Amino acid sequence: MPTITLSDLSLAEHGLTPRVTALKDAYFRAMSEVCVERARLVTQASLDQGLFGKPRITSLDKAKLYRRVLEQRTPVVRHRSAVATDLTPLTFQDRSLFAGSTTSRFKGVPLFPEFMALALWPELQTLKTRAHNPYYITDEEVRALNEEVFPHWLDSNINELGRARSTVASPSNPAVTVDAPAIKLLEYIVFFLVSKPYCLSHTIPDFSRALDLGLRGLADVAKDRGSKATDAESRDFYAAVAEAMEGIIAYSRRLAAEARRLAAVEKDESEKRELLTLAEIHDRVPEQPAASFREGLTTVWMCWTALHLENTDVGLSLGRLDQVLYPLYQKDIASGALTVGQAVELLCCLWLKIGDHVPTVPDAGEQLFGGSGSNQAITIGGVDAQGGDAVNDLTYVMLRATELMRLRDPNLNARYCADVNSRDYLRRLCQVNLTTGATPALHNDKAAIAALMAKGETLEQARDYGIVGCVEPGSNGRAYSHSGAILMNLISALELTLYNGEHRHTGLGVLISKRTGDVREFKSFDEFKRAFTEQTSWLVDQATGLNNLFGCVHQDFYPTPILSTLFEGPMDKGKDLIQGGAVINSSGAAIIGFADVTDSLAAIERVVFVEKSVTFADLLAAMDADFVGHEALLARLRNEEKTPKYGNEDPAADAIARWLAGMLDDLYAAKQNYRGGHYRVGYWTMTNHAGFGLLSKATPNGRRAGQNFTSGITPVSGMTPSLTKALNSVATLPSRLLSNGVALNIKYTPENGSKMLDNFMASVEAYFDAVPGRRDGGMEIQFNVTSHDTFVDAVANPAKYPELLVRVSGYTAYFKDLNPQMQREIIERTEYSLSTGHAVEFPAG
């Protein structure tokens, strides 16, 4: 158990250094720039290796490709300029303590033509002038994409390969075929999204392997095992590992050479020394084991740049860095080689490097994912594998760096275990939330560990969980979970039930799913629940089947030798992660619309079946009219005193919420994925609750057409006037049903004085508290602590708030980057005063 040696846990004496201040200023002024380098190099290498049209691409094929790209990509040591938001070049001196980058740009947009980059093709000429989150691109880059890159991938991207396989068995997995209608459901958008056509990167690598052995050591292990392997596929895999590690080593050496080249012409002696130091570090790591804290950070960073060459920049997460790097930090502090202030500066520089790229989002995608970063989660604190206190000095150093930087990436997640971690630690977590207004998210170790163990993980594996992407818990470096595989709109299951297999978005009269009965003829709520379960089960079948299909396409065309090397399992099995090489092989589904469906079911039970005050025919007519002319019914449905609402400790509504979570867990757990694992269910929504809401008509809970759904597992906005009741309702959901994580979004009014911090702590402790036989305690909670007036002003004057950080649903974003619908959803969330414990009323509009 680590001993905390810091006298001031806030590390208030350590602020932003001039170096970091300059880098941060440039970062926020710079415009995101499309980087075509990766796309060009991967395309040319694929042509030269004859990979286009090949029926199967092996791990060794991919490793050779990645090695070639790593040996050819630009070795960026100092970015000299970037494009500002006014499209004029920035002038600044990049003196980061880290070399290398995930793209060739200061703030780059990497393109993966293997996935969804082709969605940008029609928009290349308008990318830099679009209204939301524009990307700068030169005319030459547009030409290169039009002529040299995109045409080669028309039939060779994951989406089209999946479409071609929709009725044909996969060579790797002949048991998996999917009927073409499931592809059509995906194209409708309103039912579900499966993300494999875009990425397969929601997971956490094991950096300790690179830190302890160095990449040369990992390559040597692979060569030794390959010489002893008895089957061709294992030999191919081990050869791929060695090949990939050589590529990363070569890239780091090229960075060392570039640093020396720059040092030779540098006039400033201080800058010359820094460049020579960078060269010395890259001569050693990541090839050799890391011998210092800075070398450890550099090893992580070099592996990170390589992983983002192989994997799209969505949800790939760094795990428990305060645990992995603590021995190196402690050694350097004890020897005097490192000070706390130097460690803070190093982490600030690394945080900026981690955010040096943004995901590729086409204009239409702004409604679903607008404002999202890459969701690169870092996890701190909690307990260790033996159940001891894992909070250490480095935990607090990482908190201070996060507090100073206020960046959306990395997405900091803090674990807390009552009775093991100190209340001083919890107080510091709450204090940082008040300072930043939005981070870190807080996770209850007891609930999360219980949820993972309910899915078969050992106690030690579950205790060593990290957060993936938004809020998803996964055993660090051993669970290849793709926790964002499916994003399911639960409102569509309700819609299919209400309209007997039809959907108003696609047009009534067109059968989408199956007939489960005319609800106007149902005699009981149980009959309605059975029909709803059937429709939900049908949607789950379609989504998991399609996810498995695309998974098989990955098996045939997109192995991951770099990530497989940095994972527990593949080196022992001689098998790539995509083939099931991990220790744990789950897949994840996120449910959108949970609270809206819960309240809709509660309303149906009460007004249609219990009170019989409204017939189903009248309810459907009101919904079809968007409640115009049915204002009295609308008011009745929205009144939390007359109609049960989840989040008010109402027994009927909370019972439906528990039934719903149990039903979804049962349906998904019964499904096996293409790697031999099973599905896990979570409740986090990114910005999909806005996008799906925009596409959906009125619902029985009184939500009108086009309005946002509620985020994550949060109760519906405006329906829960008591903070205590809202927290208690959510905390009664059994943790075993929430194994893919939850996002509970709570909004507080900023208040003066230390009393707010005391109340903040008390609200977290009360929410996390377990009551045997009644509740497991809440699993996760995250906050927005910004005044209503500030948000309203930020909409009117976005230039005044370039760094205003907000929690969306699982991740942080800059408020100015969100589309208007998502900004409105943030503003309209129930806002509580901690001094009163009640919702604050604001004028409409």
Image (cartoon, helix red, strand yellow):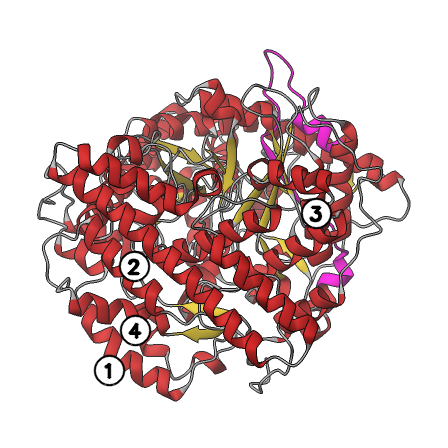
Horizontal side of 305 relative to 838 (left or right) equals left
- Residue 342 appears in the picture as rendered: yes
Circle 1: residue type: Glu
Residue depicted at x 23% and y 62%: 157
Q: CA distance from mark 2 to mark 1?
A: 23 Å
Could you tell me which quadrant the C terminus lies in?
Answer: bottom right
Chain part drawn in magenta: 763-791
The first of marks 4 and 1 along the sequence is 4
Single out the mark in the foreground, 3 or 2. 3
185 or 84: which is nearer to us?
84
Is-magenta flag for residue 769?
yes
Disc on res. 40: 4
Q: CA distance from mark 3 to mark 2?
A: 36 Å
Residue depicted at x 47% and y 34%: 476
Circle 3: residue type: Ala
Asked if the residue at tag 2 contacts the one at tag 3, i.e. Cβ–Cβ closer than 8 Å, the answer is no
Single out the mark in the foreground, 4 or 1. 4
Single out the mark in the foreground, 4 or 2. 2
Task: Please tell me in which quadrant of the rendered image residue 833 appears.
Answer: top right
Residue at which label 1 appears: 147
Q: Position of residue 383 (x, y in %)?
A: 61, 26
Disc on res. 337: 3
Q: Badge 2 local density, few (<14 within 10 Å), some, or many (20+)?
A: many
* SS class, disc 3: loop
Q: Badge 3 local density, few (<14 within 10 Å), some, or many (20+)?
A: few
Residue at which label 2 appears: 66
Horizontal side of 765 relative to 474 (left or right) equals right
Q: Position of residue 527 (x, y in %)?
A: 35, 26
User: From the viewer's perspective, is residue 162 above or below residue 140?
Assistant: above
